[in-house]
Image (cartoon, helix red, strand yellow):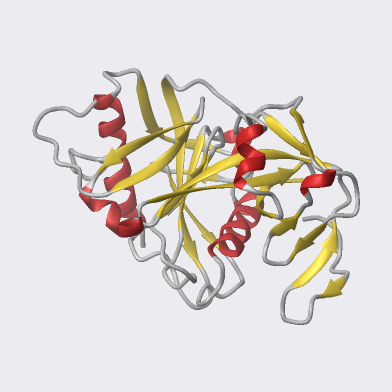
Amino acid sequence: KNPANQNPIRPSFIPITNNITMRFSLASITALSALVGPVFAQNGSSNYVRRAQESKCTLFIKVENKGSDGDKTSYACTLASSPHSFLEIEGLSDEFFKRSNIISGKSELEFGTGVTVSSNNVITLNEGTVSVGMSNNPTAQSTTGVKKTLAIRVKAPDAETTSSAMLIKDKIFGTAGDTVNLSERYNTCSYGELTFEPYVGTTSKGIIVDGVAEVTINVNVSGQSKYNIQNAVTTAAAEQIGNLSQEFDYVMLCLPPGTSGGWIAYAYINSYLSVY
């Protein structure tokens, strides 16, 4: 539902349950769009691989906005030992996922031990040895009510998020007078049923003011896969801020410019996480 006189400029995403992605129309989002175990072997390049110690992972549908190229749907999963690290999946066809009737954040891939996970956060599976079950710890949550939301601004050795923390707060929560912001759009378009509220208070590792925190990572951004940087940020945030999936309803990562490929934003449906 789009209120009158609101002109959508560029869509972005926050993950919503029931395999639905709500989109907000916000011109200023352009400013935001700016595992376990040791390494075992090298695959002939700078990409290292290891053997996963677990036999299943929780499956997520990822929706990515690629600008003029439209939206792209793909799949990722998380291991129980590293729930903040989302692994891209290779070796399974779209037809496999379609016929499996998966539910993002609830379905599990069961694959036995010995599958490989690369340092680029890719898990390689084989359709002949993979089955789909249901997780005992689904991540889905209600799509109505007031949601505690955290946006993370990132500092890396070679780059940092283009927008300041103050600007991010204003464009998401309207803290400095922006009346058409992300929180307002969701609240208005849902007729007051869904509100994203800035997290304010003490976490297990520190204090958050006005819903935005800064996280420092020790890896360069330039030329890196967005997934590598994403996982570097969530790992660092767990140490510097606290448990992202348990202490907040939704977390928005605002990455620095310079990652490889062309993209604007993406989110994992039925997950706490969206990335810009």
Image position, residue 209 (x, y; %) = 42, 43
In the picture, the quarter occupied by the N terminus is top left
Vertical relation: 17 (above or below) 231: above
Q: Residue furthest left?
A: 5
Left or right of residue 142: residue 10:
left
Query: Residue 7, how many percent across, how many down?
Result: 14, 41
Please state which of residues 100 and 161 is positioned toward the viewer in this rendering: 100
Q: Residue at x 79, y 51 (%)?
A: 126
Work out whether 70 lies above or below 207.
below
**Direction from residue 231 to residue 70 in the image, left or right:** left
Left or right, residue 149 beside residue 235: left
The answer to which quarter of the image holds residue 56 is top right
User: Could you say which quadrant of the image residue 231 lies in?
Assistant: bottom right
Q: How many marks?
A: 0
Quadrant in which residue 248 is drawn: top right
Measured from the top left, where is residue 128 in percent x and y? Answer: 82, 46
**Residue at x 79%, y 76% (from the top left corner):** 43
Q: Residue at x 77, y 46 (%)?
A: 127
Q: Closest to the observer: 248 or 42? A: 42
Front residue of 14/74: it is: 74
Does any portion of residue 247 appear in the rendered image? yes
Looking at the picture, tell me which residue is in the foreground, 53 or 160: 53
Asked whether the viewer can see residue 204, the reply is no
**Residue shown at 31%/34% (left/top)?**
183
**Against 91, is 137 above or below?**
above
Q: Position of residue 276 (x, y in %)?
A: 42, 54
**Farthest residue, direction bottom:** 45
